[in-house]
Structures are given as C-alpha cells and as structure tokens.
Image (cartoon, rainbow, N blue to C red):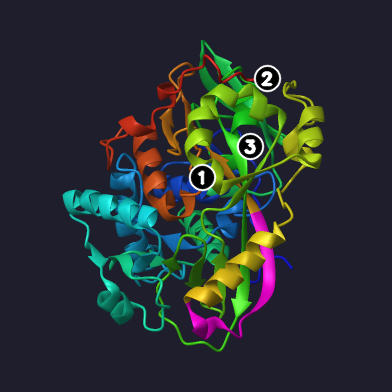
Amino acid sequence: MPLANMQRPGFECALPEAADVVIVGGGIAGVAAALFLAEAGIDVVLCEKGFVAGEQSSRNWGWVRQMGRDPAELPLTMESLDLWRDLDRRFGIDTGFRETGITYVCRTKAEIAEFTAWEKHARQAGMPSQLLDAAGLQNVLPGISAPYTVGLYTANDGRAEPEQAVPQMAGAAVRLGARIAENCAVRGIETAAGRVSGVVTEHGTIATSSVVVAAGAWSRLFLGNLGLAFPQLKILGTAARIETAATVPDMPVGGGDFSFRRRLDGGYTIAQRNANVAPVTPDSFRLFFDFLPTLLTSWRELKLRVGSQFFTELKMPRRWSLDSKTPFEAIRTLDPAPHMPFNENALKNLKRAFPAFAGARLTHSWAGMIDATPDAIPVIGPIDAVPGLYLSSGFSGHGFGSGPGAGRLMAELVRNEKPCVDPAPFRYERFSTKHAKTA
C-alpha cells in the first residue's frame, strides 16, 4: 500500500513572464528555499514536474537529527534543527515536529566503537549527546532487550511528519507571495552572455537571472543536458508503517538492523537500518570510480540489483532541445516498488529488540529514491561555470532533517547575504569531473 497520510493541497499558478528566482523541484530543498526567499520579499516561482513532496521528501523516515552526521555537515544540521523548532510558530503551519530526542542502540563492538568515537564530535560541537550504559539505556528506553547495553542519546533531536511537513511549508511560501506550479516540468535554462537569463518549462518561458536546481534524484539528468557533470546515483530506500498496541518511548530509535519512529496517526514508521538497494544503471558504470571509495567502505549496507531500471535509464534521452518533450514529463513521479524483505526483516529485528512490538502488523509499505553523492554530503551553492545557476541536491538520505537549514542557506547565497553556516563543504566544485561524465 502507498503512503498513509500524504497531503495533496494542490498548487497551480499562471506562469509569469519574469521572476527574480525560479526553483526547479518541489521537494523539501526547493520548497524551503522558496519559503525563505518569499519571506525576504523575493519574487520566486517554484516549478514541480509532478506534485509537491511527491518523491523522497514524503517517503523518508521523518527523523530530524544532528546525531551521527558527518562533522562537515553538522553545522548545517544544527542550524536546521533550530529552524524546525520554530517553523510552526513562525509560519503558522503544522509540520508535526516534536523535540523528542533520538537514541542509537549498540549491540556489536563495531557499533559501540562507532558511536563512542562520534560522541567526541558531539562534545566539540556543544551537542547534548551522551553515551548510556545498560542502566541508562533502560531508563531512556524501558523494555529494550538485554543484548543492547550501550546507547548514544541526543536529547534535543526530534521527528516530524514527512507527508505533511513539506506541503505545509509550501502553503506558507504561497501565502508569503511565492508562486508554485505543479505538473510543470522545467526543460532547461537559457543563457545570455554566459549567465542565466531564463528557464524554459513545458508551459512557457520565465525570464530570470537566478535558477536553483533542487530536483533530487533528477538533478544529474537535468544538469547533464547543460553539459554539467554532477556525480549522483539513485539509492532505493524502503520503509513501512506498522500498527501496534505496544507502549514504547516517543523518540525515534535506531539499531544496527532496525529503526522506528512514532507517527502522529498512531502507528510507527519502521525500516531496516543500514540496508538499501543500489539499482545498477548505466550511471553506475559512468560513475564507477567516483563512487568506488564509498562502495569499498559501505558494501555491506547495499544490495546491488539489476532490473528494469537499467533498461529504462538506458533508453532515456540524456540530451534534448528545449522545444522537445523531456524525461521529466514522461515520468512525473518516481514511485518505485518497496523491497519487502527489508520491511519484513525490520519488523522481525524490531520485535527482537523491543518485545513489546510482538503483536505489531504491517499496514503500508513504500520506497523512494535517495539522491546520493560520493561523499554523502550535498551540494548547496552556485555552479561557478554558469553565473546565476545554483544547485541544492545530493542530500544522500539526510535531506528531510537538514532541509530547512539548506533552504535558508540557499536563500542567503542567492541574495548574496552572509550565510548562516560556512558553505565551503557544500561547493559543487569539490567534485572532480575527471570521472563524472554527463553521458
């Protein structure tokens, strides 16, 4: 079954002849950028080929965490969490955010070593993360089974509702003056004297001097038509909803092979942690050397799969003229089938970790395509080769939690204001184009 509570308010507008900024993509990265640009009084138009939050932004786990992030990404996630705490009040919306804390529980020596090491980063960043022994773990997570004797707990992390948060943020952006057009694919950009001068959509052209590409898993294809190489692969993430009469803590919890988050609808979102499907596609070969270091360190977490997606992408046009129909119009929404063995394992492992879940049953299963970069850190910033062109993509499964921070940072960069965090770790130019071919 599909997502349980997806909000579909519907957004449409007459495309203007011109705008200060045009955003390509209606996931959380694009919507958050539109929200903060509109709040600052900027004339912004967001074009979404399908519907707002139709892909990974509504299909993720709903965790809002700092804990466990790459140190280079940590300032952004901390900034984002501060924004999450105030989004509902600031914009009069309901994202479902709750500051519940998050705990990772450890069962193996490798897991204990990983989170013991990460706790040092937390101390340096001033985060309230703490290692818990067996007694502390039982105090925070009553009922957890005996094999789990160590945990890492961060009191000010939280959770939100993916199916409602981004549509709510989009509605707030519209009330502040942004224009959002669903079912409006952007085919490409136009330039004059080497810099951005407009975007061409399936419904007409909008003159603009600034374009933000926030197209999630589609960003590489979009940029490739411009001759720009962006090393990005799609990873299939699978999740499920369960119902149970169990009484367990409100906070999200993750172990080596399970995770859960309480939902506002009374159920729980679960997933098999550290388990994703890596579909083998033509880009897997084009970007083999870019992603080889990641594959060597993370191969245990990935299930390689050759299937119909390889042939779909093999036949997909990688170059097109701006008066032609594009792949973005042919596939409005990526809606991949979930990998059910992962969901079944997640529930089995969850019951082992928390016996209170013994009577739980699966009610919904879904999957989404995660946009991954070789270093698992997003690009947020300008593309120097094309003045006026910006990219916010490659969040590698972290986009929901860091989305508000990424949106604020992008809005500040577009406006040439002092950024809320150092944007240097997120530069597009950090990637060598030696291997990252566009086709």
Please tell me whether mark 1 sits on a helix, a strand or a loop: helix
Q: Which sits in the foreground, 176 or 370? A: 370
Is 234 displayed left or right of 63 in the figure? right
- Kindly identify the residue that appears in the image at 56 percent across and 61 percent down: 272
The answer, for residue 41, to whether it is visible in the render is: no
As drawn, the label of residue 30 is 1
Tell us which disc is closer to us: 1 or 2: 2
Residue position marked by numbered label 2 in the rendering: 439
Callout 1 amino acid: Gly
Q: Secondary structure at mark 2?
A: loop
What residue appears at the point 54 percent right and 48 percent down from the top-left corner? 301
Vertically, is 11 above or below 379?
Answer: below
- Mark 2 closeness class: few <14, some 14–19, many ≥20 residues within 10 Å: some
**Which mark is first along the chain, 3 or 2?**
3
Does the magenta-highlighted stretch encompass residue 358?
Answer: yes
Which region of the structure is painted magenta? 354-367
Of mark 1 and mark 2, the one earlier in the sequence is 1
Name the secondary structure under disc 3.
helix
